[in-house]
Image (cartoon, rainbow, N blue to C red):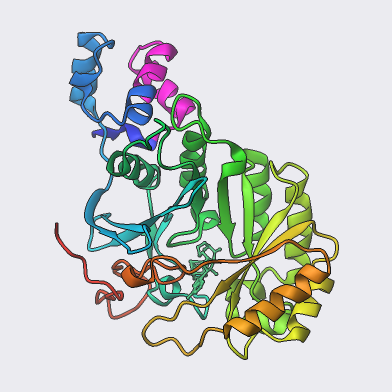
Amino acid sequence: MTVNLLDFDAAGLSAYFAELGEKPFRARQVLRWMHRSGQSDFDAMTDIARSLREKLKAEAEIVPPAVVSDKLSDDGTRKFLFDVGGGNAVETVFIPEDDRGTLCVSTQAGCALDCAFCSTGKQGFNRNLTAAEIIGQLWQANRALGARPDGERAVSNVVLMGMGEPLANFDNSVTALRLMLDDNAYGLSRRRVTVSTSGLVPVMDRLRDACPVALAVSLHAPDDGLRDELVPINRKYPLRELMAACQRYLEQAPRDFVTFEYVMLDGVNDSDEHARRLLHLTRDVPCKFNLIPFNPFPGSPFRRSPSPRIRRFAEILMNAGIVTTTRKTRGEDIDAACGQLAGQVRDKTRRSGRPVIGIHEVRSQ
Ligand code: SAH
Ligand code: SF4
């Protein structure tokens, strides 16, 4: 069977090269060609012996997911749609800012966790992305975006905040994270790579031990009653356990705070009282808050909180000394805003077996 070399981190590639009878430094060279130079053609790897190139061509390949559409928003946000086979597509969003460029990467086709306000969740779950499909999104984005005028790569930050729950696809997400951090691959600092989780408590501990990067936790409610409704995984891992997991994570984290994401839903979780209860809930967890104005999608029962409400909510948190930002809604004209990512997913979990078409049709180039 042909092996996709994008599925390996440095250790995995060395092990594969050892099987081929090749030295670890050869693996390192190939890793650099693939990820630093964005090369997928073995014949272009000029400092690799021809005999090794022939061996690799016979047994291996370098195949990222194919880009099926690439759209640019008026505000510079760019959205890529990737074909991941079997009628499934996932999305990746690039958000340029003055001092950085952030790539929002997907980890699953669909998501099984079914949060009430999330378009991806509403599509159901199809499958975990492979490590090649996860890192392949960064590989493709780097190729499409090119370098900035100062020669730096366009992507300086990565957030696993696209479609899916990264901690429900732990091994492949960690392989991709290791490549993001590896100096022979993307060389990003741990502080510039963020995993966002809805709160899979035991896996947060595993991430801390395996590959601590910056952590964002999707909170969305100050009490278990409401969070059980909005983020159903809360029924398994309630807030008390989640707060304790955040504290444990911070022992190893590259940043000394957790970012709590909080989607602002009109009349649901956005009152002054909710804000005050959040202060109480998070009193022992060094944190920042990122308020996300709800992004509507067809069929969703929620409305976005009005701006003055969001400002007042932020003020209560800030007056208590918590750094609070409100996420600018970007890429709305191309449906690239948080929670609008849909792609197209064939849901394996629904009995009908019919494909569930997301809010976007897959467009061919
Ligand atoms: N599964 C992970 C990461 C992907 S979701 C998680 O839940 O954290 C990334 C973020 O977008 C989460 O904070 C999620 O709650 C938020 N989100 C989902 N749907 C949204 C919507 N319709 N509007 C605004 N934010 C949304
Ligand atoms: Fe899954 Fe995150 Fe969406 Fe919840 S918010 S359904 S965990 S992708």
The answer to whether residue 9 is visible is yes
Seen at 25% across and 38% down, the residue is 63
Task: Report if residue 203 is visible in the image.
Answer: no
SS assignment for the magenta stretch, majority: helix
In percent of width and height, residue 239 lies at 74, 70
Magenta stretch contains residue 208: no
Q: Where is residue 215? Give x, y as percent.
A: 64, 52
Tell me the residue at 74%/56% (across/down): 246
Q: Where's the N terminus, which quadrant?
A: top left
Q: Quadrant of residue 339?
A: bottom left
Relative vertical location of residue 339 with respect to residue 161 in this rendering, above or below? below
Whether the magenta-drawn stretch holds residue 14 is answered as yes
User: Is 75 left or right of 242, judged from the image as shown?
Assistant: left
Left or right: 255 in relation to 165:
right
Q: Nearer the viewer, residue 153 or 344?
A: 153
Q: Position of residue 26 (x, y in %)?
A: 37, 13
Q: Can you give x and y, in whole percent of width and height, for residue 120 in the image?
A: 41, 70
Residue drawn at x 42%, y 56% is 106
Residue 77, quarter of the rendered image: bottom left
Q: For the magenta stretch, what is the residue range? A: 8-31
The residue sitting at 43% across, 42% down in the picture is 155
Task: Tell me the quadrant of the picture where the C terminus can be found.
Answer: bottom left
